Image (spheres, helix red, strand yellow):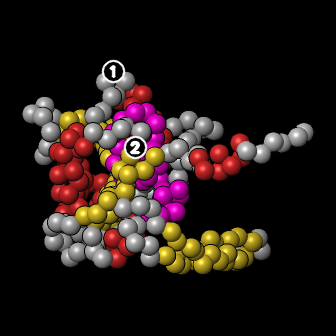
Amino acid sequence: MSEKKKTILITNDDGYFSDGINCLYRELSRIARVYMVAPDQEQSASSHSLTLNRPLRVHKIDKNCYITDGTPTDCIMLAVHLLFKKKRPDMIISGINHGSNMGDDVTYSGTVAAAIEGSILGIPSVAASMANYEPGTKLDQAAKFIAKFVKIYDKLKIDPATFININFPLNGGRPYTKYEITTLGMRQYKDIIVHKTDPRGKAYYWIGGRAKWKTTRGSDFEAIQRKVVSITPLRLNFTDFVSMEELRKIKFKF
């Protein structure tokens, strides 16, 4: 990184009060100008949702720290178009999430969605998560790893359309020294719907279940299993180019 400090926007889906985002704010503030725009409450599994059917509220709670009653995607939109109206941030970092964001779960994740929104806006973006998080888990070493990654990011020459998804294994608070560049893994949920009845006799439901991961060599899940930091480059383009070529061979008649 050059002598000029980067300007970094951070957000998350756990809420502005979470250990992950505050640990990240403290560590990144040593090397950059950091602004936090985060949800005022937990927005886990909000995916890439944008609030369009009601107004959003924004409150400044401290120097360079703002909260809103919207989703992580709302946070990025509000920050970039209001706070950074004249000059966009150099990077967006979402996290550190309390829990992993690997494999198919990235489609549900509000943490990853914030990085997706950053990539759509052409801003280098990173999502970061702590796998198997439990309350009280130390996140300092994960934040230090991210700060080191920020320092070398410009040398990597990554297209801003690509965003980076980082997952950390639990390691007892020791420095992270090993990482691997990985693919998205695959998981299957043993989904269950729990049906209950409230005191007024009306039905309500909980979506639950346990994740079952397929251990695929070179995947994010496999790296985390071996206690190695997983770094996965992702892009938003969902186009299946193989199927596209096959479809072009077919002549449809209507």
Name which residue lies at 17% across and 57% down: 144
Q: Amino acid at mark 2?
A: Thr
- In the image, residue 240 sits, relative to residue 142, either above or below, namely above
Which residue is under mark 2?
A: 162
- In the image, residue 143 sits, relative to residue 32, either above or below, namely below
Is 116 colored magenta in this rendering? yes
Name which residue lies at 65% across and 77% down: 192
Q: Amino acid at mark 1?
A: Lys
Which residue is under mark 1?
A: 86
Residue 152 found in image quarter: top left
User: Which segment is the magenta one?
Assistant: 101-127
In which quadrant will I find the C terminus? top right
Q: In the visual, does 135 lie left or right of 104?
A: left
Residue with the most extreme right position: 254
The answer to whether residue 33 of the structure is visible from this angle is no
Residue 69 x %, y %? 48, 45
Depth check, front residue: 79 or 113: 113
Depth check, front residue: 201 or 153: 153
> Which label's residue is closer to the chain start, 2 or 1?
1
